[in-house]
Amino acid sequence: MILIFIKFFHYLAIVFSGGVLVGGGLIQAVYTKANKIPDINIANILKILGYLGLFSLIILWITGILLSNIIYGGFTINSAFTLKIIFAGLLLGLSIFINLHVYSSNKKRLPPNKNILKISTMFSRFLIILILLCVAIAFN
């Protein structure tokens, strides 16, 4: 029963983190293409989405560690899984960096650097694709 509970929260965190990445990325892309800065309400939404994404990634890590230990006895599953862990670590680090950047910008009452956001969004999408590819290979 505990395994089902952990898997449920793992899958729920996958849905949340993916939704945040897509939703936040689309909002940011629209403003970037229009060469405009989001107003305060949209900036607050992006900040909340960033926090939700980071929280989802942390839940993914916690439940993923539990699942890999319960099912496989640790992280030494195969090389594709090892790459997935590395890419997931990079994604977590990027999410922390972006959240700190947005928090710092809000505190200074300045808009976040749109180049940093654009590059990080593109890199996040790339990492998600690599993670999903490695998962597909690791658990075929």
Image (cartoon, grey):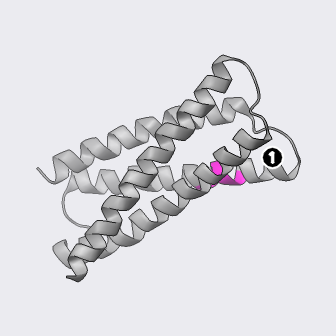
Magenta region: which residues?
96-100
Q: How many tags in the picture?
A: 1
Work out which residue is located at the far top of the displayed protein and give it. Answer: 34
Work out which residue is located at the far front of the displayed protein and give it. Answer: 41
- Residue occupying the point 22% across, 74% down: 4
Given the image, on which type of amino acid does mark 1 rest? Ser
Q: In this view, does 23 lie above or below 135?
A: above
Q: In this view, does 29 lie above or below 85?
A: above
Q: In this orientation, does residue 74 appear?
A: no
- Residue 51 among those drawn in magenta: no
Tell me if 95 is positioned left or right of 127 in this view: right
Percent across and percent down for residue 71 are 17, 74
**Label 1 sits on residue:** 105
Tell me if 93 is positioned left or right of 99 in this view: left
- Residue occupying the point 52% across, 54% down: 53
Q: Camera-side residue: 103 or 30?
A: 30
Tell me if 119 is positioned left or right of 56 in this view: right
Percent across and percent down for residue 96 are 60, 56
Work out which residue is located at the far bottom of the displayed protein and give it. Answer: 1
Q: Camera-side residue: 73 or 14?
A: 14
Q: In which quarter of the image is residue 86?
A: bottom left
Q: In this orientation, does residue 124 appear?
A: yes
- Residue 98 among those drawn in magenta: yes
- Residue occupying the point 47% across, 60% down: 56
Percent across and percent down for residue 127 are 42, 41
Q: Camera-side residue: 26 or 138?
A: 26
**Label 1: which secondary element:** helix
Q: Quadrant of the N terminus?
A: bottom left
